[in-house]
Image (cartoon, coloured by chain):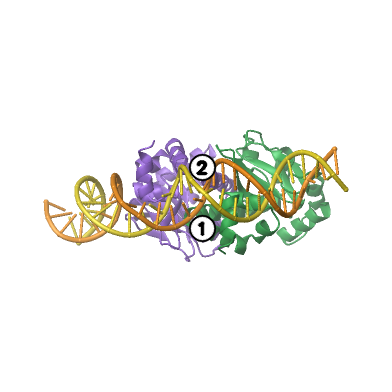
Chain colours: A purple, B green, C orange, D yellow
DNA sequence: TGAATTCCTTGACATTTATCAAGAGTTTCG
DNA sequence: CGAAACTCTTGATAAATGTCAAGGAATTCA
């Protein structure tokens, strides 16, 4: 697993950083079961996760009890409740393993230590933050400016994994529609 | 105007930074008319704006020609197409002055120079990025998990300025509903 | 493997929200 | 200031989406 993270870091930076082994040593391996919860609403997020294998769902539960997915993360991506993690404040979201996963996790203290010790780390973090922000912005815009069918088309073109790899129920929760509506709209494509 | 920016920076950092005058010198004052466009879709965003007075609307135009607002920014806030600005890529959004504004703007080159020269600047940028990301995340979650009436209530409690200071049409475009629906739902509050 | 659970689809119906049209009110700007 | 443009509201109607129920298919896990 750590080989994969090593590879990921080298690709991101475009070269082999000095303290790479120190960085890798900070991470702990973790295997999870299907549907295991990594974070619940109200809980403080204690880790950043690197996904070596599997898929994580970040979602909220609305008044009616429905799960609404903000994002799915697959292999070679990072997941955490960024804001809650950085400020060690309770999360408003849940993080769930929607596949059995192999993760590499790093704690808050270790994360801070790395940020202190390794300037490049801060740079990578900034990059990730910018891309995450950009995705969230894009997602707000698809919700305000597209109807359900347009959003499905958008998903086909931009995130086909969500449609091919995950259940329809999960895809529907990402699209912000009911599973029934999703079934019906699929015929109109 | 620069007094206001000086004040803002000091408050954000919690103290007076060394290079404050250098920073302030990088900004250019700019007055805008009502409805002036600062950025159009397809254009590359060349500036970061600090709002000394007024309000900026960041929005997209959907297939049907409707404006969908992602965010409104008021006094003492920063606005730009962050991702497009950092990577100097075409924007997918528009930025419009929905009030006559007094802005302080800084160009891409000046922004990079500041980031190079002033470590604290990077720190402040990271803070702003985290808060912006958090807002965008919150906004995605309100869209996926709340109906129109719940979103209006949420707005009353969290962003009353949008309801009191701006037109109903603009508020509706932020809520992702038509002005007619907005009129009707207001009676149900 | 096999029982239990969850998921997907379909139908019928209810609810929410959009669209179009029109008139009164308000704002903008030369 | 006053004409032009835009905004807000209301009604009528249409379109989109949600909810509930039920059966068959697929998946999970002991």
Snapshot quadrant of residue A189? top left
Closest to the observer, B41 or B117: B41
Q: Is residue A97 found left or right of D8 in the rendered image? A: left
The quadrant of the picture occupied by the C terminus of chain B is: bottom right
Q: Is residue B46 found left or right of B154 in the rendered image? A: right
**Which circle, 1 or 2, is nearer the viewer?**
2
Q: Secondary structure at mark 1?
A: helix
Q: Is residue A2 above or below residue B155?
A: above
Closest to the observer, A35 or B112: A35
Q: Secondary structure at mark 2?
A: loop
Q: Which residue is mark 2?
A: A146
Distance in Å between CA atoms under marks 1 and 2:
41 Å
Q: Is residue A146 visible?
A: yes
Mark sitting earlier along the chain (1/2): 1
Q: Which residue is mark 1?
A: A110
Badge 1: few (under 14), some or many (20 or more) residues near its Cα, within 10 Å?
A: some
Q: Is residue A186 above or below residue A177?
A: above
Marked residue chain, label 2: A
Residue shown at the point (39%, 43%) measured from the top left = A162
The image position of residue B3, as x and y in percent, is 83, 55
Q: Which mark is residue B78?
A: none
Q: Is residue C22 found left or right of A75 in the rendered image? A: right
Q: Is residue B119 visible?
A: no
Q: Is residue A40 above or below residue B109?
A: below
Closest to the observer, B171 or A90: B171
Marked residue chain, label 1: A
Residue shown at the point (44%, 55%) measured from the top left = A59
Q: Is residue A41 above or below residue B18?
A: below
The image position of residue A74, as x and y in percent, is 41, 45
């Amino acid at each position: 697993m750590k080989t994969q993270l090593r590879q990921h870091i080298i690709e991101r930076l475009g070269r082999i950083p000095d303290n790479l082994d120190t960085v890798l040593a900070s991470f702990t391996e973790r295997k999870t079961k299907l549907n295991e919860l990594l974070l619940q609403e109200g809980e403080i997020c204690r880790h950043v996760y690197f996904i070596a294998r599997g898929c994580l769902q970040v979602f909220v539960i609305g008044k009616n009890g429905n799960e609404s997915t903000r994002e799915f993360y697959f292999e070679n991506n990072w997941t955490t409740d960024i804001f809650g993690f950085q400020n060690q404040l309770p999360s408003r979201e849940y993080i769930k393993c929607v596949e059995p996963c192999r993760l590499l996790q790093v704690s808050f203290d270790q994360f801070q230590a790395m940020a202190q010790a390794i300037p490049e780390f801060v740079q990578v973090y900034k990059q990730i933050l910018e891309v995450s922000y950009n995705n969230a912005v894009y997602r707000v815009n698809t919700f305000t400016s597209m109807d359900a069918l347009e959003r499905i088309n958008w998903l086909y073109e931009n995130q086909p994994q969500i449609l091919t790899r995950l259940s329809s129920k999960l895809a529907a929760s990402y699209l912000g529609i009911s599973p029934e509506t999703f079934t019906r709209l699929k015929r109109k494509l």
